[in-house]
Each structure stands twice: as C-alpha cells, then as structure tokens.
Amino acid sequence: MTHTPRDAAAGAPAEPVLDVRDLRLAYPARRGAETPPAVDGVTLRLEPGEVLGVVGASGSGKSSLARVLAGLVPSGDEGAAVPRITGGDAAVLGQGLRRMGRRARTRTTYGIGYVPQDAGTTLHPQLTASEAIAEPIFSRDRRFDSQVAARRVVTLLTALDLPPGTQDRYPHELSSGQRQRVALARALVLGPRLLIADEPTSGVDVMSRVAVLDLLRDLQSRGGFSALVVSHDLAVVERLTDRLAVMHRGTLVGYGAVDDVLRDPTHPYVRDLAESRTAANRGPAGAGPGDAGTDGR
C-alpha cells in the first residue's frame, strides 16, 4: 500500500524525492539541426520510501530520463552523449535541476545511487570488488577512515549474498550476477536517499536475475530509500513495485498502480503490455523476469 510519509514536526506531507513536471529532454544537435525530443512532457512523482517502475521499449526515452535524473544535468550543460532539458523541470531531493549550480549538484549527487545499464561491465578492470565499491566514499572524502569504509563494504557484500573472498576478486573473476551485485553495492555505499536503476538485470544470466531483484527489493525494504527502476520488462518492475509509469516514444502513456494501468488500457503499447502479462501468467511455470531479452535502451 502506498502511503505519504509526514514530517513529524510540522505535520505536513514530506517533500517528494522526485517531482518531475512537464519535463522535456533533447539531445544536442550538430550544425544547428533540429532533433526530436527524447522525453516530451513527462510528469511524475516519487515519494520518500517509495518504488516506481518505468517501463518502455527501446527508444521510449526511459533511459534518457534516468540519466538526467541521476546525473543532474541542467539545460545545455553537457555534451552530445547526454540529453539536455529543453522544457519543464524536475526537482531531485528538493533541488530543481534547471537552476542548480555545480556545488549544489555535487551535494545532491551524493544522495543518489545510480546503476546504469550493463552496470557490471562498467566496473574498472584493475580494481578489486572492494576497491570498486569503496571508490565513491573516497571520491567524496579522501581522508575518510579506511577501516570504516572497509566495514561498510563488507556489510554490503554480506547483504548482497556474495561469497567470501569476493572483495579481493577482479571483475573478470566474477560471474555476471556477481558483477551486477558489486555495481549495486557501489551505488548504495554512500547510503543514498534515492536509487535509480536502469535495466538492473541487463547482462545478468537468467538464473541470477530473480536473485538480484529479490536482493534489491530486500535492501530497499530494510534501507527505506526511494527507488526509480527502469526496464523494458514488466516482470522486472512487478517484482519490485506495484506502481508503474509507461513510456512510449518520449511520452507518458500510463501512470499509476500496475493493475489500474493495465486493467483498461487505451494506448496500443499499454494494451500490448497487458496482453503480454496475461499470456505470461498463463504460460509455463518457471519463466523468470527478463526472459524476453535485454534490449532496453
């Protein structure tokens, strides 16, 4: 059941973790050419302690939305690989993106954990698992107590059910599921208020996908952080939350409780999702999240 946390002192509803209002994103064009919007007029909210799933096919704009919310990119500030804000706004942890200065952006980023697509492949090949997980700690504070950092790393490795000795292994010595868990630990090591996970099971073997999702769900439940989970696979989202935002060609075409969104769909893409869900529920036992593939850009 979704509930709105309240400020005990003021008795008012707590500030949303994400407040996206009519947001428009576009990738910078070369030689002045016009580019179609990657995200066009999206509005959504994420409350403290809540999990929201964002589902869409390739080209829907869901990963562009995740990158901007996680990277805190203001209008026109970055290069061609990152979309820029061309309309609307988004407040992340109470800070509006369009008017956010660099210092405020850095401070806010420390409250966000980001798991990119194929996160396991982004681990530095020359860092052990423990070094990779601890790196964000020392990037924020080079004088941080190394023993405290080591204990924090061990706590996360244990919580993510990684075997003894994992901390001393390099990425090529880990399975795809283990690499993904290390990437998740790295995103959580600073104790973020918000986790943004883009295709959290991409690049993970089928047998490990359910385990990764269940661990993520357990960590979120115990840690109380908010999470925005992006996936092309409805089954992935449903394993983590009952709240859904559906994107199609840059626009939001469904938003609310999963059952409400899929019960009486009007948009063709949402109708396809509903039909696929019904077919999967009638299918052979044992089909797990992510069996449809990993194309989620």
Image (spheres, rainbow, N blue to C red):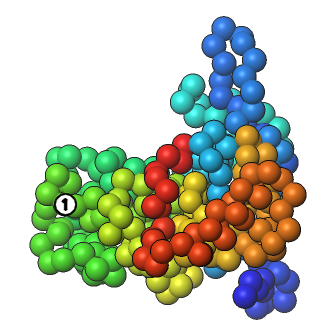
Determine whether, in the image, residue 116 is placed left or right of residue 163: right
**Residue farthest top in this picture:** 31
Q: In the image, residue 286 lies at what x, y percent?
A: 42, 76
Relative height, residue 17 to residue 79 (above, below): below
From the top left corner, tell me how far across and down residue 33 is, in percent. Answer: 72, 12
Q: Position of residue 261 (x, y in %)?
A: 79, 68
Amino acid, disc 1? Leu
**Residue at x 20%, y 46% (from the top left corner):** 125
Out of 215 and 79, give the one closest to the viewer.
215
Left or right of 288, for residue 98: right
**Residue marked by disc 1:** 174
Q: Residue at x 57, y 25 (%)?
A: 80
Q: Is residue 283 shown above or below 68?
A: below
Q: Where's the N terminus, which quadrant? A: bottom right
Q: Residue at x 85, y 83 (%)?
A: 12
Please tell me in which quadrant of the rendered image residue 131 appears. Answer: bottom left
Q: Nearer the viewer, residue 118 or 7?
A: 118
Crowding at label 1, few (<14), some or many (≥20) Cα neighbours within 10 Å?
A: some
Label 1 sits on a secondary structure element that is loop
* Residue 79 visible in the snapshot: yes
Compare residues 206 and 257 and report the one nearer the observer: 206
